[in-house]
Amino acid sequence: MTQAWVVLSRPDRRDVSAPTEDQLAAALADVYGGNGSATLKFGYDDGLMYQVEVGQDGALRYEEWSDRDCEIALATPRHMSCKQEVALQIWKWLAQRQVAKIRSQAWASGD
C-alpha cells in the first residue's frame, strides 16, 4: 500500500516528520524573522512529491516532482510573494494533501 508522508525542513535544516500546525507556524516565524528558509514536502513512498519552500523575504516556490528524488519535474516551478499567514495556509493545505487548492493560487510560472 502506498504511504503518504509530510516532512518539514526547518531553517536550521533539521527535518520534522508529520509536523503539527504549531511546528509549521514556528518554522515560518523563524523564516520571516530573517533566519533562512524552510521547506514543507508532501509525497508518497512510491511516487509523487510536492514541496513549498518559503524564504525570509516572503518568497514562496512551489514544485511538483515525479518522486522523492526530484528526478522529473511535473510542472514548471511556481512563485509568489506573500505574508506569513498566507504561507501558513498554503503549508496547511499541503500537509492536508489539498494540492488543487495550492495550484489554484495566484502563482507566477518560471524560474
Image (tube, rainbow, N blue to C red):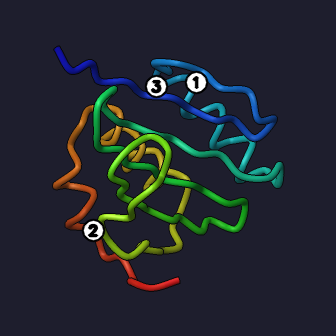
Discs 3, 1 touching: Cβ within 8 Å? yes
Which one is in front, 26 or 65? 65
Secondary structure found at label 2:
loop
At a point 31% along the width and 70% down the height, the residue shown is 75
- Name the amino acid, label 3: Glu
Q: Which residue is mark 2?
A: 105
In this view, 91 is above or below 45: below
- What is the spatial separation of the Cα atoms under label 3 and label 1, in whole angstroms? 5 Å
Please identify the quarter of the rendering in which residue 39 is found: top right
Image x and y of residue 36, in percent: 79, 52
- Name the amino acid, label 1: Gln
Please identify the quarter of the rendering in which residue 44 is found: top left
In this view, 79 is above or below 93: below
Image x and y of residue 6, in percent: 42, 28
- Name the amino acid, label 2: Gln
Secondary structure found at label 1:
helix
At a point 42% along the width and 61% down the height, the residue shown is 63
Graded by Cα atoms within 10 Å as few (under 14), some (14 to 19) or many (20 or more), the crowding at tag 2 reads: few
Image x and y of residue 111, in percent: 53, 83
